[in-house]
Image (cartoon, helix red, strand yellow):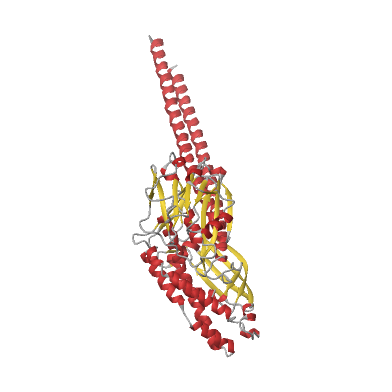
Amino acid sequence: MLFTKNKKAQMQLMETIGVLFIFFVLVLFGLIFYFKFQQISLEQKEEELLANDAMDITLTALFMPEFQCSRGSAESEDNCIDMSKLRAFNQTISDYINDYYFNIFGFSKISITEVYPGNISYVLYDKEKVSTNAEGEEVSSWQLKESTFFVVTLKDETHGRNFGSTTRGIEIKGMYGVGYITVEVYS
Amino acid sequence: MSYLKNNKKGQYTLTFNWIYVLIAGAVILLFFIGIAVKQKSISEDNLSYDVTRILESIITAATASEQTKNFVDTSSLTDYTFTFTCELDDYGGFKDIFSGYGVEDTSATEETIIEPIFAPAKIQTAEMITWSLPYKFPFKVMDVLMITSSNTKYFVIGDSSEQALKEELLNSTIDLNFEFIDSFDDIDPGDNYQVRIVDFDSGLSGSQVTDNGAIPESLESLDDSKVSAISFMSTGGINYYQKEGNHFEKLNNEVIPIISNSPDERDVTKYAAIFTHNDETYKCNMIKMFERLEIISEVYSGKYQELLEYYSEGSETYDSECLTALQTNDPFNGIHLAAQVCTSSGYSQCISLINYASEIEQLNDLLDLELCVTIY
């Protein structure tokens, strides 16, 4: 009788342990599923933010008064780069990258490539995400990169003589080329 | 006896089982409540970050599109109060500037060290209005963003000190919450979130907004932070006022000069002053523009040097004429150095910029007149 009772109690204990085990296994599955889901949605969100950043930076770069074509007091010319200003800016920017332009462009690379008439490429801004490894060397530490391209006209007023301009500035002012702006954003 | 003992043991087991179930149930319940609470807090944080992110996109788009007014539907965000701050460093310069916007009572903030945003200190609205205008000095320095809301009411009074600006305002603010009035008696705040009085009579005998001057009766019941005023002096310059009980208190000690060289065009610096919270945020945002001016003037200095080389290499008659015009004056180095002083020493040191801007404008006009390549 005592033996039967003891066995019954053991059975009940085993049953309780079994129930608890299954319960915690289910909770564990739930947690793993939840965290995996969270991780995937975070990655998606990160990609989405990166794409947004790339668009914002491209938009900002296209309207930079530092190299956008101007027409006196009239409105600036859209999607047009003044090559004289661009060349000057290319020499100036290095003094202001960390203190100023990093706040606008963050970790990204902005370059302008001439397609016609020449094929010169200007890297205006390049700030890659880097970290220092065990050997003390700087290595790239970005995981994602989003690139956007935008076609622009390149206005060059001081390189017009080769194109047969003879009157002061009239034809020279109309010297336009074609190129594209590349914005690469790192995450 | 054995039966009784057995029964008592059964009772103990039963009680123990119930206590065990209760404790286990409570632990499990607490675990899930903990997750739910944590999730709620994360969701709230995420929402405020999303809201800031939306605001960032609105601001980027508005800054990039020159001379546009955008009416942004924020009806789903009416529970949130947006805050805008801008504080200069101890010397009134740019070096340790603290500037940003965010959602009140949350950690969701976005720094705006570069972008000047002229806005009230707080906005809680179903419709946000962004207005971007280019700041030209005389070349374009950057697009200035002004932010207001459909429930921020502007009462414009007087017409003596800035007649041209008032007329311009009348035409350009038709779609904003502006009302042009003749006296304080016409002021009715309605159910607007905040009220700003724009006084164009300041410095004259008819001036209505003065230091320690009486608050219009209809505004007395409003919270102090919701009523402010700006007055345009007949001698040039502006003053900011804030409601303190039943009177106005002047916020700035010295009159704030307007630093601009476009008296005949739409003057963005005066528009910006109307939408800005107070004297400090106005100066702070202006200093941001002068910091950009410092860099852009260096770029134009480079272009100026390139033009000098270009015309000195040429052998045509116009080359020498354009070269002479260019050599008349080199104001770019001057404006660059003046901007450096201004951004490190404070707004009061920025007045000299006006003369350099005027010289640059003259030079560009001369080049244009001689049919040479212009600087800007």
Answer yes or no: is residue A53 visible: no
Measured as percent of width and height from the top left, residue B241 is found at 41, 51
Which one is in front, B116 or B25? B116
| Residue drawn at point x = 41 percent, y = 10 percent | B3
Which one is in front, B128 or A179? B128
Which one is in front, B236 or B331? B236
Quarter occupied by residue A33: top right
Measured as percent of width and height from the top left, residue A5 is found at 45, 19
Measured as percent of width and height from the top left, residue B280 is found at 40, 56
Answer yes or no: is residue B196 visible: yes
| Residue drawn at point x = 44 percent, y = 29 percent | B26
Quarter occupied by residue A67: bottom right
| Residue drawn at point x = 51 percent, y = 53 percent | B147
Q: Is residue B130 above or below residue A91?
A: above
In the image as oriented, which residue stretches furthest toward the front?
A: B205
In the image as oriented, which residue stretches furthest toward the left?
A: B90
Q: Is residue A173 above or below residue B246?
A: below
Measured as percent of width and height from the top left, residue B369 is found at 58, 79
Q: Is residue B301 left or right of residue B368?
A: left
The quadrant of the rendering that contains the N terminus of chain B is top left
Q: Is residue B45 left or right of residue B252?
A: right
The quadrant of the rendering that contains the C terminus of chain B is bottom right
Which one is in front, B183 or B72? B183
